[in-house]
Image (spheres, helix red, strand yellow):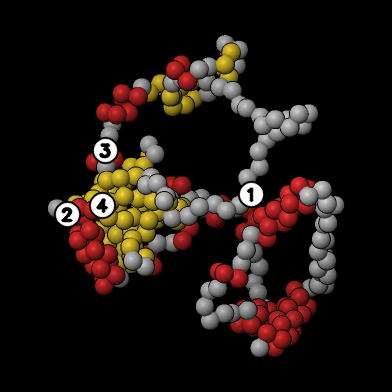
Amino acid sequence: MPKAVWKGSISFGLVNIPVKVYSAVSGKGISFTMLCSKCGTPIKYKRWCPKCEREVPWNEIEKGVKISKDKYVVVEKGELERLKLKTTKAIEIVEFVDISQIDPILYQTSYYVVPEETGVKAYSLFVEALRVSGKVAIGRVVMKNKEYVVALRPYKKGVVMHVLHYLGEVREIEELEELRGLVTIREEELKLARALIEQLTSKELRLEAFKDSYAEAIRKLVKAKLEGKEVEVEREEEAELARDLMEALRASVEVTKKKKVVVE
């Protein structure tokens, strides 16, 4: 049973719905542990003060905000407690919008929001109202010592809460120099590109067709080493580079046509 990462309420108008929040995703990749190359022991990291030249115990650790080079303002735990906002224990709904107004680049991470026992009726009404209206609730909440802007939308039986980036956190793509050299595309090139897109277009997204091939390869490598077998490395054939863009597009369209015929 997963553990709730936050408890509080959804607040909009005079309505308060007691809820719990769970992580909606869990990483399935391979994590590496840093080992000593001489004895194979996991490496430990110390809280080291380079000025005092000593390891600092947890009871001597303070939190500080950097304001300039080598200058920090220390913030005490009690001071942080007194700063608690309304959104520390509530997801405060501010407005409702169409989901089309949220650019996907703003999505940061996702959580499931479920009702506490005392909030089942109000939660059910909230979910159904979102579903019928076709709207997304925009609000704010404090989690992990930061206030986030969030979007709540109906998802299957419940509600999913997307943490959004603030606008100031998203870099402007126009700042990248490489985009200043874009060129005008010929009509024939565009026609071939669209034909390739049409050939590769599916009626629906099939995420089950995708898997983490790299993680799978690492698992096979680890299994082989445990069994004392020689590790076989499958080398991919290097794709032959086309002489120009038009040639590459024509060849791609033909290849996808053949693949489609084989599948059908």
- The Cα atoms of the two marked residues, 4 and 3, are separated by 22 Å
Q: Where is residue 113 in the image (x, y as percent from the top left)?
A: 33, 55
Along the polypeptide, which appears first: circle 2 or circle 1? Answer: 2
Along the polypeptide, which appears first: circle 4 or circle 1? Answer: 1
Task: Give the residue pinned by disc 1.
Answer: 30
- The Cα atoms of the two marked residues, 2 and 3, are separated by 18 Å
Q: Which of 73 and 17 is in front in this view?
A: 17
Q: Disc 2 marks which amino acid?
A: Val
Q: Residue 210 has which mark? A: none
Q: Nearer the viewer, residue 53 or 189?
A: 53
Query: Mark 2 or mark 3: which is in front?
Result: 2
Q: Residue 116 has which mark? A: 4
Q: Would you say 95 lies left or right of 5 here?
A: left
Toward which corner of the image does residue 234 lie, by quadrant?
A: bottom right
Along the polypeptide, which appears first: circle 4 or circle 3? Answer: 3
Q: Disc 3 marks which amino acid?
A: Leu
The residue depicted at 66 percent of the width and 68 percent of the height is: 183
- The Cα atoms of the two marked residues, 2 and 1, are separated by 44 Å
Marks 4 and 3 in Cβ contact (< 8 Å): no
- The Cα atoms of the two marked residues, 4 and 1, are separated by 34 Å
Q: Would you say 144 lies left or right of 96 here?
A: right
The residue depicted at 76 percent of the width and 29 percent of the height is: 39
Q: Quick check: 75 above or below 226?
A: above
Along the polypeptide, which appears first: circle 2 or circle 3? Answer: 2
Task: Give the residue pinned by disc 2.
Answer: 15
Marks 2 and 3 in Cβ contact (< 8 Å): no
Marks 4 and 2 in Cβ contact (< 8 Å): no
User: Would residue 206 be visible to someone looking at this image?
Assistant: yes
Query: 10 Å neighbourhood of mark 2: few (<14), some, or many (≥20)?
Result: few
